[in-house]
Amino acid sequence: MNRSGRTSPPERWLKRTILGLQLLGWFFLELLIANLQQARLVLTSPLRVRPRWIQFETRLQSPAARTLLGALISLTPGTLTCDLRDRTLLIHALDASSDEEAIWRIRQRFESVLLRMETI
């Protein structure tokens, strides 16, 4: 940090790289969990799914960050971002017990890291 209290470009780059790696780690964990859940759904009989539509209001400011969030959600098996208007994502979940649980996971795993990346 320099005298004006601002971080230098190399410091910002390093912080964003670390946050990007954290985001990637969360994504791979969610990918593993989602794949196991989808395998369980397919292999159990009879098929018991709880599909639902979820409206997710994001706190992300940047359109690029909101788009990345939607892409991360869509790349996770069993979920699909169907629409993004302003700050609201319309998400279809193949198997979700509640909106609150799905929203909590998205906020904790993906949005929180993207929010920190926006503020650097």
Image (cartoon, grey):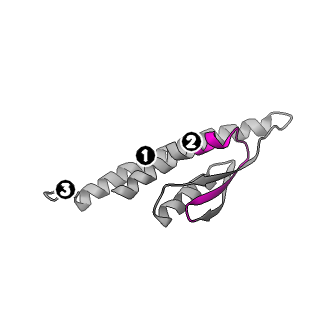
Magenta span contains residue 89? yes
Mark 3 vs mark 2: which is more N-terminal? 3
Residue 61: image location, x then y, percent:
46, 61
- Marks 1 and 2 sit apart, C-alpha to C-alpha, by 17 Å
- Marks 1 and 3 sit apart, C-alpha to C-alpha, by 25 Å
Q: Residue 22 carries which label?
A: 1
Q: Which mark is residue 56?
A: none
Quadrant housing the C terminus: bottom left
**Residue sitting at x 59%, y 59%:** 88
Q: What element carries label 3?
A: loop
**Residue extending furthest left?**
3
Mark 1 vs mark 2: which is more N-terminal? 1
From the image, tell me which residue sits under label 2: 104
Q: Which of 16 and 61 is in front in this view?
A: 61
From the image, tell me which residue sits under label 3: 5
Displayed quadrant of residue 36: top right
The amino acid beneath tag 2 is Trp
Magenta stretch in the rendered image? 86-105
Label 3: how many Cα within 10 Å (few below 14, some 14–19, many 20+): few
Magenta span contains residue 37? no
Numbered disc in front, either 1 or 2: 2
Q: Is mark 2 on a helix, strand or loop?
A: helix
The amino acid beneath tag 1 is Gln
The amino acid beneath tag 3 is Gly
Mark 1 vs mark 3: which is more N-terminal? 3
Label 2: how many Cα within 10 Å (few below 14, some 14–19, many 20+): few
- In this picture, residue 110 sits left or right of residue 119: right
Label 1: how many Cα within 10 Å (few below 14, some 14–19, many 20+): some
- Marks 3 and 2 sit apart, C-alpha to C-alpha, by 33 Å
**Residue sitting at x 19%, y 56%:** 5
The vertical placement of 10 against 25, above or below, is below
**Residue sitting at x 76%, y 38%:** 41
